[in-house]
Amino acid sequence: MAGSSAGAADGAVALPAASPGLGRLALPRIRIVVGPLAGRIALASIVVAVLAVVAFATAGPSVLVPRSDEVFPPWEAGPLHALFGGLPHNQLTLAYGLSVLLLLMAVAYGVVLAAVRNLSTRAIVLSVLAIHGLLLLSPPLQLTDVFNYLGYARLGALHHLNPYTHVIGAEVHDPIFRFATWHNLHSPYGPLFTAATYVLPIGSLSVSYWLLKTVTVLGSLAFLALLWRCARNLGRDPRVVVALVALNPIYIIYAVGGFHNDFFMLVPSTAAIALLTAPVGDGSSLRRRDLGAGAVLMLAVAVKFTAVLLLPFLLLAVDSGGRRLRILAGALLGAIPLAALSLAVFGVSLPNLQDQSTLLTAFSIPNVVGLALGVGGTPLLLRVADVAVVLAVVLLLAGGLRNADRRGDWISRAGWATLALIASLAWLMPWYLIWLAPLAALGASRGLRRAMIALTAFLLLTFIPATGIYLSDHGIDPMATPAGHASSVLQHKLSR
């Protein structure tokens, strides 16, 4: 697609030619130039696709909104229900329609990335804001975690039961019971997030629901704003960085559209990166930034423990033992009040990470590898995956310390470690991609960005409804192994 002559090189994707020589075929150098018009059309296509998904989701009970066939009150459907309430709701058609739209969004995403340097900041920012505005008016898409968050909040704030020692099923007469999924699972969410949900107007389920959705969408925008700031700190084009993350179809439909609390982890963890990548000022401001980076990272850890993986790479980012000690001191100072908060509200109880770590999803990497070996995701294979993550982190850190002059790429090293973590998880959900996306976007490694795109394609193809329908129609069950059966039994027990 031809673009304008000005800036055409910015949107070019070059396929490397083979080196000429004896016995070698020299291939011509091919350039694909994507101009601003194609980029704007792709941006508009993503926004229109989001509008279509939201319209059908708000129209009535459907496969787009889990459990909506059982309960779908007007306050969940949202204000757009009055506009789109007459849309047809053939479940099979909607399932295939969502699959096609996600694939079209993926194609448009690729066009945007090819054209992003020819697009204005205004076009990208307005598109991102429009997408977030539309999703705010939508019921939760594909998963019901937002109701699980509210279930644990009501369990503690309204019924005075510790969500780390009690389950949502302990209050079967609470209206949240019909919306929540994990009725017999102790809360796996961090103490800071869980305690923060207690301040919602918990007596009104509808008000709590809309407040939590609004704060989550604002959290996504705050995260993207910090990502923009980090890009500027690193001398990267913020349009490229934000487009790579915010316009990814998984980020849009599964992360923002599902209203997941991962944004409350990403905001402080990205703030820690912003502090360490900020332009160097005087010595006192440097000390404050080091202390602040360690402290705000602990906020992320107190939301989801996954964020602790970033800590050793923050230490790799700095160039002296004194600075590393300040980051560790900041982490300790940040952890003390958070531990006190946890003890005061929840006692010595901790989030339940064990149950979820024993569950399998059909296309988690360990289960796929196990299927290739003919055994599925066995406990032994999962332990091997855990050991592989530890080894990967050690090797990445050792490589960073050994190549001191390349320490500036510590963000990419953190990204590879995060990718290893995602690949090791038995319970793999599509929005976990957003743990990796900011590190891939900010880091210097092109390989990591390619790996993120590959993971995006894998997650889309394995989680779109059409894949499940096709496998079911052809009698293919990736969970038809002893480990898969055990996981299905446990999942049924935790959710019934």
Image (spheres, grey):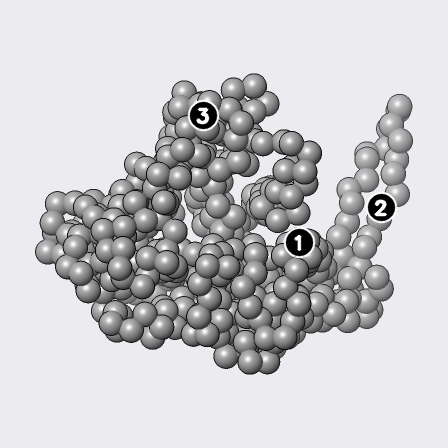
Q: Secondary structure at mark 2?
A: loop
Locate residue 355 relative to residue 69 in the image: left or right: left
Q: Residue at x 52, y 31 (%)?
A: 479
Q: Which residue position holds label 1?
A: 92
Q: Residue at x 59, y 75 (%)?
A: 85
Counting from the top left corner in percent of width and height, residue 210 is at 39, 73
Give whichever of discs 1 and 2 has the lower sequence position: 2
Circle 1/circle 3 CB separation < 8 Å: no
Q: Where, quadrant-wise, is the C terminus in this rendering?
A: top left
Give whichever of discs 1 and 3 has the lower sequence position: 1
Q: Which residue position holds label 3?
A: 483
Q: Residue at x 66, y 67 (%)?
A: 88
Depth order, front residue of 126/209: 209
Q: CA distance from mark 2 to mark 3?
A: 49 Å
Counting from the top left corner in percent of width and height, residue 483 is at 45, 25
Q: Of tags 1 and 3, which is closer to the observer?
A: 1
Q: Of tags 2 and 3, which is closer to the observer?
A: 3
Locate residue 437 relative to residue 190 in the image: left or right: right
Q: Residues within 10 Å of mark 3 (few under 14, many from 20)?
A: many
Q: Where, quadrant-wise, is the N terminus in this rendering?
A: bottom right
Q: Which residue type carries mark 2?
A: Arg
Q: Which residue position holds label 2?
A: 29
As displayed, is residue 336 above or below residue 416?
below
Counting from the top left corner in percent of width and height, residue 367 is at 51, 29
